[in-house]
Image: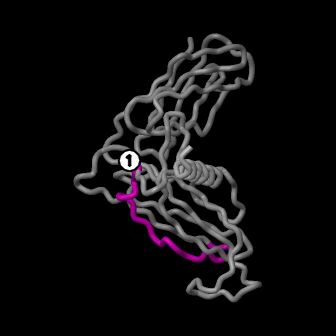
Amino acid sequence: MNIRRFFITYKKHFLTALFLLSCITPSHAVSLSTHKIHLDQKKRHYDFIIHNKDKFKQKCKLYLKPITFNKDNASRLLTDGEIPLNSADPLLLFSPKKFTLEIGKPQSVKFKLRIKRKTKAQEYRSYVAVDCEKVNEDTETFADNGDNMRVSPKLIHNIPIVARVGSPNYKLSFSNLSINKNKLTVNLNKTGIYSTYGELKFIDKDSNKIVGKAVLIKMPIEAKSKLITLQLSDKQKESGLQLTYQESNQYLQPKKIAIDIN
């Protein structure tokens, strides 16, 4: 095996693993006002709030990360200067990029979507990394300019940014719906080059009771269909039911689809 190719492959897998770990590992040091930023033509500005919950000051920096997804919603951190075709990086402005979080105080980072005349109407995507580490003042004097500060191990949050330009042109639908005792399976289908995030509910229309629910359903731009399984509260009757999918209200024009089971 080519040794150089082996180390390049190893480096890519190692960086991807670090990226995924930073996405899913919780942090008790800082809290964030949101875990997804949505921007569009009518909502071009967003104030992202970071709050220091630790007993030490935090030295933070924010920067954009190039990532891509496959149709199964698996992410991959790109290396060697690769940039996704649908990257939102050229459309984004944010400030400040470096700051110190005071104990118990929030810091606002202002994001702006910059749409130029020749910007193609579609959905763009980026990730902003929130990279913070503790400043231990007991062992070293704190300086306002950030120098001579001793820091401890850090945790990086990766926050997705979805930026839509133009009117979204995509459709959602259900297929292959099946109910077996207390389990429901269904395919959620999507056309067009847009993502969708939302929740699925299975409702007894007679009592208006939710008998099954799936939250945090995510389909990136690349995904065309997603198989969803719901565990139902009881064995269900065969009529008077409704299945609905509602997109997140953070979208400019959130879509909703429903199917009745009569």
Q: Secondary structure at mark 1?
A: loop
Residue 255 on the magenta segment: no
Colour mode? one colour
> Which is more toward the observer, 248 or 85?
85
Instruction: Give the residue at x 52% y 48%.
Output: 5
> Which is more toward the observer, 41 or 118?
118
Q: Residues within 10 Å of mark 1 (few under 14, many from 20)?
A: some
Tag count: 1
- Quadrant housing residue 229: top right
The answer, for residue 16, to whether it is visible in the render is no
Residue 100 on the magenta segment: yes
Instruction: Give the residue at x 39% y 60%.
Output: 92
User: From what the image shows, is residue 177 above or below residue 101?
Assistant: above
User: From what the image shows, is residue 121 above or below residue 191?
Assistant: below
Magenta residue span: 84-105
Instruction: Give the residue at x 71% y 72%.
Output: 152
- Indicate the amino acid at tag 1: Asn
User: From what the image shows, is residue 3 above or below residue 233?
Assistant: below
Percent position (x, y) of residue 170?
A: 38, 33
Percent position (x, y) of residue 156?
A: 61, 61
User: From what the image shows, is residue 233 above or below residue 107?
Assistant: above
Percent position (x, y) of residue 126?
A: 45, 53
> Which is more toward the observer, 122 or 140?
140
Name the side, left or right, on which 164 lies relative to 159.
Answer: left
Percent position (x, y) of residue 172?
A: 44, 28
The answer, for residue 180, to whether it is visible in the render is yes
Residue with the mark numbered 1: 86
The quadrant of the image that shows the C terminus is: top right
